[in-house]
Image (tube, rainbow, N blue to C red):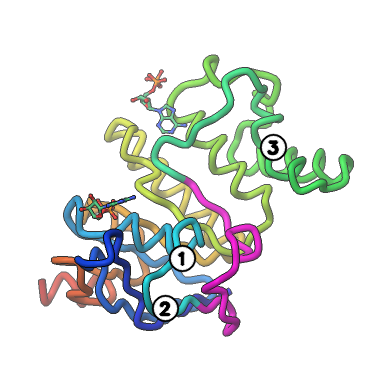
Amino acid sequence: MSIELKNLSKSYDGNTLTLKDVSVRIETGEFFAIVGPSGCGKSTLLRMIAGLIPATDGNVLIDEKDVTNLPPQDRNLTMVFQNYALFPFLTVKDNVAFGLKARKVDQTEIDQRVAKALEMVDLAELGDRKPKELSGGQRQRVALARAIASDAKICLMDEPLSNLDAQLRTKMRAEIRELQQHLGLTVIYVTHDQVEAMTMADRIMVLHDHEVQQIGTPLQIYQDP
Ligand code: ADP
Ligand code: ADP
């Protein structure tokens, strides 16, 4: 699914703009990264796209439909965050199934989707464990499985790897990219890590001083920093 942002702005205090006039079209199946220093408004932008916070100005379109005033559950998207809170008292399976149960999806279908999602992230054998019995990387993969099981075609990720060590991060970058291509997901990936954006993304948006400074392929950004 495509995502279009039209002159999107955000002010938290009704005075200063945390995000000024962001416009871009992200195509179906694109891996789109948003980079910029801490505090420049990356998470704010992602949360507006998700519908978690209202836009002060501008519009969000998903597959050409204006969703600016729709709640998150009506936007056909899923999210993976930095500290993706897994429920400690639920098994891996139940953590992955949680959103589907809340949406009253049929139990047989839940079982199938959860099994498939866990298989895709290579956790099929660990479905009955609790989060504390997993390593950091495995827990992050549970969060990914949850996103996969949701069946949404858009996945918003906010620094999903920043708590992992360097070696695991490199491995997970490749895994996320592989899953994204396999599922044909449109991904918007927020990171403060330039290298991460350069190695993963089809295109990158650079935010600076609460504005779009540049949008381009990694090569274009590299040649014209
Ligand atoms: P980034 O993700 O790039 O680090 P954020 O979008 O988290 O940036 O934050 C951008 C700015 O907006 C920061 O100055 C931050 O303090 C401010 N901000 C974020 N969330 C809120 C909020 N709920 N209320 C007021 N200000 C906020
Ligand atoms: P390991 O045993 O593989 O070293 P840890 O459980 O010690 O893994 O976690 C390593 C790091 O990863 C910690 O900083 C932890 O906070 C972080 N981490 C663990 N699970 C997650 C998760 N689901 N999402 C984000 N960060 C996580």
- Magenta segment: 61-80
Q: Report if the CB atoms under discs 1 and 2 are less than 8 Å apart.
A: yes
Residue hosting label 3: 98
Give the camera-side residue of 223 and 28. Answer: 28
User: Residue visible at 37% across and 80% down?
Assistant: 24
Residue hosting label 2: 5
Give the camera-side residue of 141 and 18. Answer: 18
Residue 82 lies in quadrant:
top left
Q: Position of residue 10 (x, y in %)?
A: 32, 67
User: Residue visible at 66% across and 22% down?
Assistant: 90
Confirm if mark 2 falls within 8 A of ligand 1. no
Circle 1: element type: helix
Which of the two discs, 2 and 3, labels the residue nearer the N terminus? 2
Residue hosting label 1: 49
Q: Position of residue 97 (x, y in %)?
A: 71, 37
**Is 109 covered by the magenta stretch?**
no
Q: Amino acid at mark 2?
A: Leu
Circle 2: element type: strand
Circle 3: element type: helix
10 Å crowding of disc 3: few (<14), some (14-19), many (20+): many
Give the camera-side residue of 15 and 75. Answer: 15
Give the Cα distance between marks 2 and 3: 30 Å
User: Residue visible at 60% across and 42% down?
Assistant: 145
**Is 78 covered by the magenta stretch?**
yes
Give the Cα distance between marks 1 and 2: 8 Å
Which of the two discs, 1 and 3, labels the residue nearer the N terminus? 1
Tag shown at residue 3:
none
Q: Amino acid at mark 3?
A: Phe
Q: Report if the CB atoms under discs 2 and 3 are less than 8 Å apart.
A: no
